[in-house]
Amino acid sequence: MNYDHASIELVRQALIITLKIAAPVLVAGIIVGLVVSVLQSITSIQDQTLATVPKIVVMVVVAVILAAWIAQRLVEYAAALLDLSGPYV
């Protein structure tokens, strides 16, 4: 199979941007989940909502706080794609 190098590079850059955007939100969820799990094991409370609700709240808060940064990364990527001379092409 013969793939166009530019299209492969575009997909690769899109995946990298996606990982960069999603990483802070996911890391916040992992940290909160770990803290809640430790607290649940210490107190022997095994309620599922106690583990899920704080993760959702923290992940939404982090996403709202980082919304401007996320939008800037997406705008830069879209501008580079439309420009066809940017670093992503």
Image: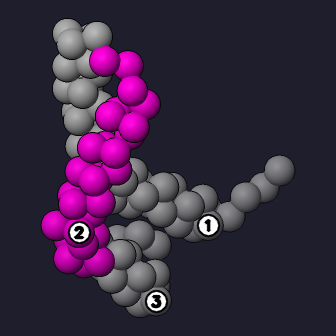
Q: Secondary structure at mark 2?
A: helix
Of 19 and 79, the residue lying toward us: 19
Residue 40's place in the image compared with 75, above or below, is above
User: Based on the displayed image, in which of its 4 quarters is residue 44 positioned?
Assistant: top left
Q: Secondary structure at mark 3?
A: helix
**Residue 31 spot, x, y in % from top left:** 22, 33
**Amino acid type, callout 2:** Val
Image mark for residue 7: 1
Q: Is residue 80 left or right of residue 24?
A: right
Q: Quadrant of residue 83?
A: bottom left
**Residue shown at 73% from the left, 58% from the top:** 3
Q: Nearer the viewer, residue 43 or 77?
A: 43
Q: Position of residue 53 (x, y in %)?
A: 34, 45
**Residue lying at 56% horizontally and 61% vertically, measured from the top left:** 11
Q: Please report the bounds of the magenta region as a residue range.
A: 45-72
* Residue bearing mark 2: 64
Q: Which mark is residue 82?
A: 3
Q: Residues within 10 Å of mark 2 (few under 14, many from 20)?
A: few
- Asked if residue 61 lies in the magenta stretch, the reply is yes
What is the C-alpha distance between the residues marked 1 and 2?
A: 32 Å
